[in-house]
Amino acid sequence: IDNKINFFPINTDLIIYLILKNIKNNCKYLEIGASVLKNFMQVNNSLSNSYLYIYDLNPVNPKYKNEFLDLNKKSDSEKNNTQNKLMYFRGDLFNLNDLSNFKDHSYVDKFNFIYSDALHTPEAIYREYKDLISSSLSDKFIIYYDDLDIKGMTDMFKKIFYDLKINFNDLNAYTFYINGWVGQNERPHKNGIITNL
């Protein structure tokens, strides 16, 4: 974790580039599976006037807890100490009550950028797509998937693409290899994008 990384772009750099090039500010961003916020806080530091959401099974990293509106607490008040609105929802993607509670929040009803980085199994990404993503997309969007080189993931990525193509005829999908957050210190991961931008 303390190893130096070089200046070759990683997936987070590409995510930020795609947002700034295609969406600019006022992004409605959802990150599914944020871990310790290593990606999310870089996105936050690169945008302004945006709504940035996390949906994760774990509690928020204590270092950043005070920067988030906790969507699990009905009485939590809106935070204004960053250039963006940061919202955190702790929930299980396989729990329909959690999904329903997340969707009940009215801050943002549609997302124009979704980063899927939670449980890396074909069943999990299809479930999050069917129960959350498919009904949460704005008219123009980018869905970004990590770790598609795990067995069965690319096939499920294609299934999701063809399912979305029923309602979005100008849709494109791309896969490529790129380094993750530890840069050149590990092998590149197969990532994918589904977009109509």
Image (cartoon, helix red, strand yellow):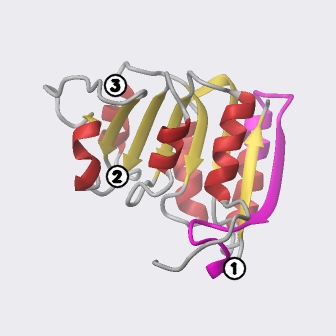
103 part of magenta stretch: no
The residue under the point 37% across, 60% down is 36
SS of the residue under disc 1: loop
Where 197 falls versus 56 (above or below)?
above
- The numbered mark, 2 or 3, whose residue comes first in the sequence reads 2
Query: Badge 2: how crowded within 10 Å, few (<14), some, or many (20+)?
Result: some
3 and 1 marks in contact (CB < 8 Å): no
Query: Badge 3: how crowded within 10 Å, few (<14), some, or many (20+)?
Result: few
SS of the residue under disc 2: loop
**Which label belongs to residue 104?**
3
Where in the figure is residue 97, as x and y percent of width and height?
Answer: 30, 40
Q: Amino acid at mark 2?
A: Asp
**Which label belongs to residue 187?**
1
Residue labelled with disc 2: 92
**Which label belongs to residue 81?**
none
Disc 3 to disc 1, C-alpha distance:
39 Å
For the question of whether residue 124 can be seen, the reply is yes
Q: Which residues are magenta?
A: 161-186
Q: Amino acid at mark 1?
A: Arg
Where 149 falls versus 143 (above or below)?
below
The residue under the point 70% across, 50% down is 14
The residue under the point 66% across, 52% down is 13
